[in-house]
Amino acid sequence: MRFKSCFFFLVMMNSGKLFAEDKFCDLPHVENGRIAPYYYSFKGYYFPMRKGKNLSYSCAAGYTTETGTQEGRITCTVKGWSPVPQCYKKCTKPLLEHGIFYGTETYFKIHEKLQYKCNQGYHAPSGGTEDTLQCQSDGWSSQATCTKKVESCQVPELHHGSYFTTQRELQVNEALLYKCDEGYHTAGGNATEAAVCLPHGWSLTPKCSKKTCPSLGAIEHGGFYPVKKIYEEGDVVHFFCEENYSFREFDLIQCYYFGWYPDPPVCEDVRNKCPPPPLPPHARISADRRTYHSGDRVRIQCQSEYEIRGSGEIQCEKGKWTSPPICLEIQQNCTSPPAIKNGVLLGPLLPSYTNGDSVEYGCQRYYILDGPSTIYCEQGNWTEQPTCLDPCILNVTDMNSNNIELKWRQEELIFLHGDLVEFECKQGYKFLHTTETSPGRTRCDRGRLKYPKCVFQVPVEKCDSPPSIANGALTLPPLTQYDNGSSVQYSCSDYYFLQGSERIYCSEGQWTSPPLCIEPCTLSKDEMEKNNVLLESFYENQVYFYHGDYIGFYCKQNHFGAESGATLFQVQCKRGQLLYPRCVERRK
Ligand SMILES: *[C@@H]1O[C@H](CO)[C@@H](O)[C@H](O)[C@H]1NC(C)=O
Ligand SMILES: *[C@@H]1O[C@H](CO)[C@@H](O)[C@H](O)[C@H]1NC(C)=O
Ligand SMILES: *[C@@H]1O[C@H](CO)[C@@H](O)[C@H](O)[C@H]1NC(C)=O
Ligand SMILES: *[C@@H]1O[C@H](CO)[C@@H](O)[C@H](O)[C@H]1NC(C)=O
Ligand SMILES: *[C@@H]1O[C@H](CO)[C@@H](O)[C@H](O)[C@H]1NC(C)=O
Ligand SMILES: *[C@@H]1O[C@H](CO)[C@@H](O)[C@H](O)[C@H]1NC(C)=O
Ligand SMILES: *[C@@H]1O[C@H](CO)[C@@H](O)[C@H](O)[C@H]1NC(C)=O
């Protein structure tokens, strides 16, 4: 819309000369005819047309151009379309009894004449034997009739009047005198009248009519029929115009008790007829008559938000409208751009902003811009401004009351809008809604943070299966759950030393510490041989010793302890390790 009007404006500015001097012809209005449909659809594109351009139009069925063809061609001239496109009603040869037409044509174009002759003993309405009809824009000028000639005339019944004779029949050329009552007039319009019996009947059939409509004066460039001195109520008068003239509106008037209605028409020069008034873009027109003639004026107004350039009134001058105004979009300025909360106007800062100007916004630290960073001045209003979304500042009081703490410790307790914040429960607490996969996660939303809540964890009283130990086992097969206070017993594999309590207890969901099974020491004959030691007889045949046991050794004969010089030793088994004493041979 804006673009289009801008374009229109530019065309006006840059080629004003061309516009003013070369384009004369608007979309023609063809009554009872039309031009190709696309001209109507793309009216704004094709019109006004340039001088020298040709256009075809076609007349509706039953109508022809002035030259009698179905299609006509018009050329754009300085004075508008030439010839003015017109479609005339075709006249068809009427039926005629007791007479013949001259010529054989069946169809007649406008202004063409048709002459006929009545048979012997018949006469035309004029009284003669011949008459002529003319094809007018609305049909034949009169009816073609041939009526029988009479030998005598019958005296008709007379209302509201009286005859001066009682004779009931008159011979040709005899006259019949009659008078009308007060307030009535004779066929000729007088109080008394002599009707003459003519070969085709009464000169004026005796009749007394109520006086109503006055006679009609001659009209310029046209005529009417029937012509009477006095017209009675109900009489219809048909007007016609000469070539190049036509009526603005009706061509029929009727005599009513109050007079003529409508007023007798006027023949106007069609060469001065204007096409429908031009409608510039974004304009409104106040009149919508079908035809316009020289001197007619039409008001053109612009739609709201558009201002007019040029005269708001155009006039039809000899078939052409004076140049119409154009409608330009009103350029509204904007006030200084609005400040936004927690935001900054990045600029540009100008004393005033016109249509289409833009400014850019940013946000303060920690605030997130939401919406367009650039806003525009559009017809006096700024487009929608962005907002700066608040960050979330963690509230330690709230965190403490919810028994939560940050999962990932950080220095500043501030998060930007949209950030994911992860909390965990304080020791001994757990999340309320454990169905959620990550109950500790929450997102900062415009400064608001939904703190997750942790509650004191009620100790579990029951215990799961007791722990298994290395080199040992439970004395009884384990259960899946144990009650508070129940106990289980362990035993170690053979020769393994049980350290701690062989029985453990379930206490508020936790087992007391299970025992350890410490490996035994295995006596090595090789090591004994290497160290020249023998096992005391008390331990004879023993291979395994418990952790903590003491084992007695002595040196072989002629040997003594390498370090102490002693020959008897006590060594303790420590977690499977035996420190063998070493004996060496006594030197002689
Ligand atoms: C319009 O028609 C006339 C003759 O009818 C011809 O001389 C003229 O070139 C035509 N104009 C255009 C633009 O075709
Ligand atoms: C009507 O009367 C006037 C005079 O009174 C006369 O001049 C005129 O011819 C008469 N018209 C007719 C049709 O008799
Ligand atoms: C009617 O107008 C045309 C074109 O202006 C002209 O050529 C023609 O002579 C006019 N006819 C009469 C009867 O004036
Ligand atoms: C808008 O501003 C321009 C330039 O600052 C000025 O020429 C114009 O008159 C102003 N328009 C209105 C409607 O105030
Ligand atoms: C500008 O804003 C005013 C008030 O909000 C409104 O009435 C007017 O229609 C707006 N103008 C445009 C062009 O949007
Ligand atoms: C923290 O929240 C509590 C209430 O929930 C409020 O009273 C207190 O002012 C807040 N502290 C800060 C620093 O905003
Ligand atoms: C669980 O048992 C221990 C002793 O084994 C006892 O002190 C404690 O009160 C019991 N707890 C409950 C909740 O009964």
Image: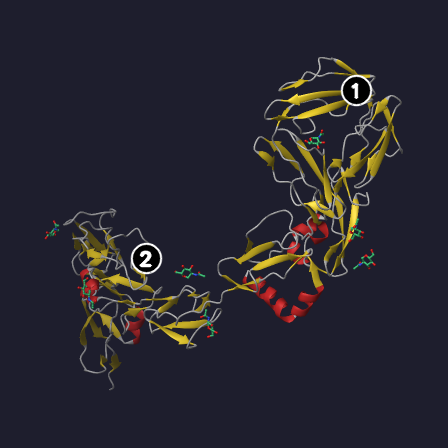
- In the picture as drawn, the residue positioned furthest to the bottom comes out as 588
Tell me the quarter of the picture where residue 351 sits: bottom left
Q: Is mark 1 within 8 Å of ligand 2?
A: no
Looking at the picture, how far across and down is residue 111, in whole percent? 80, 41
- In the picture as drawn, the residue positioned furthest to the front comes out as 164
Quadrant of the image for the C terminus?
bottom left
Residue 402, above or below 194? below
Residue identified by numbered label 1: 174
Q: Nearer the viewer, residue 29 or 439?
A: 29
Looking at the picture, how far across and down is residue 29, in whole percent? 68, 49
Quadrant of the image for the N terminus?
bottom right
Looking at the picture, how far across and down is residue 122, in whole percent? 85, 23
Q: Nearer the viewer, residue 239 or 462?
A: 239
**On residue 210, which mark appears?**
none
Within 10 angstroms of label 1, few (less than 14), some, or many (20 or more) residues?
A: some
**What is the three-letter code of the residue carrying label 2?**
Ser
Residue identified by numbered label 2: 438
For residue 102, side relative to residue 321 (left or right): right
For the point 40% across and 76% down, the residue is: 346
* N-term mark: 2 or 1: 1
**What is the three-letter code of the residue carrying label 1?**
Glu
Q: Compute the Cα span from label 2 to label 1.
A: 128 Å
For the point 46% across and 65% down, the residue is: 378
